[in-house]
């Protein structure tokens, strides 16, 4: 049964928002850079937050706010994965979770693999945790991207002690295959290394792809891996601060439980309340409607680029609302987003921020109305 696509809010209403997306640039710029979406909030989330404000329920987050159980239920419904709520702990956000887990699984100076082009904070969180970034770029095989398992094995053999996995991958939207994840787990186990899987975009996996939680990829993955998740991307809750650290083995669970209490105290109460509502079955229809809207937009973007920027190279992503677009053929230099913002008044994310592989690229957030997306690409096309 088809689902009616969720309708984005009108531009005049969106400009009343005070978040980064709507305040970084002036009203003459259309913002498509940061990972915030333009849809109305899920009704269950709105209801729980409205009630909390009315009650003055704005204090500290309790030891068990129900987030772990809510996520376990969500993972079972959406991914067919039986996560154990007793092995889940919350914190402020996904990047904080990664840093804290790294601090307890590597020694100062250890190398940590990242797979560019990749979410820019990955390059920053490794040194914050005391590690050194080791780049093993994704392999571009012409029709998509995949992990360079041979390169990852060489890095492990050379002494790398951990890898930050982005699954689904940001910015390419790649959903890694179960077989690939299982092979990665075998390599990490063989060299005594750790896998930390950022799965923040997993709830937004599209219908023609299958998301595999890393900890569910194989028994070995469950033994050596950590997953960090949040409702923040799928439900536009980044400002509320709640993420989960998920484990599936006694040793990894013990590591997460050994983290200082302050790590968990950083969980925002509003974030926890909203996450419970977001992960509830009540919010599934809203999420499905958003996915229907994003499915239309990821395909619309391909049509718009073909019409207005024919030299652009774009592959429809498996997950999320972010598009990785190669504009090298247009001839606008290593960082085309700068020219586009200045001359077309459209703000895309800067490709080089995602690593050297991002030269000539932009990342486009298509979590918006089809009309706004059309206007943005039309403006870009006017520069060609």
Image (tube, rainbow, N blue to C red):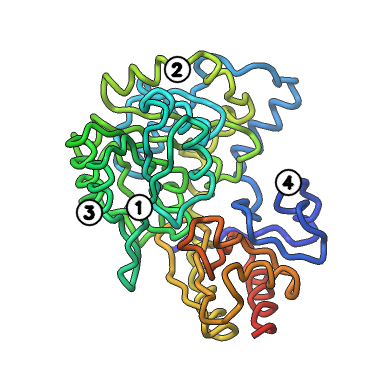
CA–CA distance in space, label 2 to label 1: 29 Å
CA–CA distance in space, label 4 to label 1: 34 Å
SS of the residue at dot 3?
Answer: helix
Name which residue lies at 33% across and 73% down.
142
CA–CA distance in space, label 2 to label 4: 31 Å
Q: Nearer the viewer, mark 3 or mark 2?
A: 3
Q: Which residue is label 1 attached to?
A: 136
Q: Which label's residue is closer to the chain start, 3 or 2?
A: 3
Q: Which residue is label 3 attached to?
A: 150
Q: Are marks 4 and 3 in contact (CB under 8 Å)?
A: no
Residue 155 in sight here: yes
Q: Which label's residue is closer to the chain start, 4 or 1?
A: 4
- In the displayed structure, does residue 294 sit left or right of residue 83? right
137 vs 82: above or below: below
Q: Nearer the viewer, mark 4 or mark 3?
A: 3
Category of crowding for the residue at label 1, using alpha-carbon neighbours closer than 10 angstroms: few (below 14), some (14–19), many (at least 20): many
SS of the residue at dot 2?
Answer: loop
Q: Which residue is label 4 attached to?
A: 19
């Amino acid at each position: 049964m088809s689902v009616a696509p969720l309708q984005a809010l009108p531009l005049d209403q969106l400009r009343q928002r005070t978040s980064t997306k709507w305040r970084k640039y002036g009203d003459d710029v259309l913002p498509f850079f940061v990972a915030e979406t333009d849809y109305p909030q899920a009704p269950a989330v709105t209801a729980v937050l409205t009630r909390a404000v009315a009650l003055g329920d704005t204090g500290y987050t309790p030891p068990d706010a129900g987030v772990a159980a809510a996520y376990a239920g969500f993972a079972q419904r959406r991914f067919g994965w039986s996560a154990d709520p007793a092995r889940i702990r919350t914190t402020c956000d996904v990047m904080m979770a990664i840093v804290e887990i790294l601090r307890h699984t590597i020694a100062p100076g250890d190398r940590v693999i990242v797979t560019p082009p990749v979410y820019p904070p990955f390059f920053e969180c490794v040194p914050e945790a005391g590690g050194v970034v080791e780049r093993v770029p994704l392999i571009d095989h012409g029709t998509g991207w995949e992990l360079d398992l041979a390169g990852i094995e060489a890095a492990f053999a050379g002494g790398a002690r951990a890898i930050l996995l982005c699954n689904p991958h940001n910015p390419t939207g790649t959903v890694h295959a179960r077989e690939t994840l299982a092979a990665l787990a075998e390599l990490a186990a063989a060299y005594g290394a750790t896998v930390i899987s950022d799965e923040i975009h997993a709830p937004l996996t599209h219908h023609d792809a299958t998301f595999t939680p890393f900890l569910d990829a194989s028994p070995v993955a469950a033994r050596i891996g950590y997953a960090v998740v949040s409702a923040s991307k799928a439900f536009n809750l980044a400002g509320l601060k709640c993420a989960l650290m998920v484990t599936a083995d006694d040793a990894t669970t013990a590591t997460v439980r050994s983290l200082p209490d302050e790590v968990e105290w950083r969980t925002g109460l509003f974030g926890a309340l909203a996450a419970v509502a977001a992960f509830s079955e009540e919010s599934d229809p809203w999420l499905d409607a958003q996915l229907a809207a994003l499915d239309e937009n990821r395909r619309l973007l391909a049509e718009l680029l073909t019409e207005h920027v024919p030299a652009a190279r774009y592959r429809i992503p498996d997950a999320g609302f972010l598009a990785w677009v190669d504009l090298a053929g247009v001839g606008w230099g290593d960082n085309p987003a700068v020219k586009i913002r200045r001359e077309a008044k459209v703000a895309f994310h800067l490709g080089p921020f995602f690593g050297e592989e991002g030269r000539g690229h932009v990342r486009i957030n298509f979590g918006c109305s089809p009309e706004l997306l059309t206007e943005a690409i039309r403006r870009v096309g006017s520069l060609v």
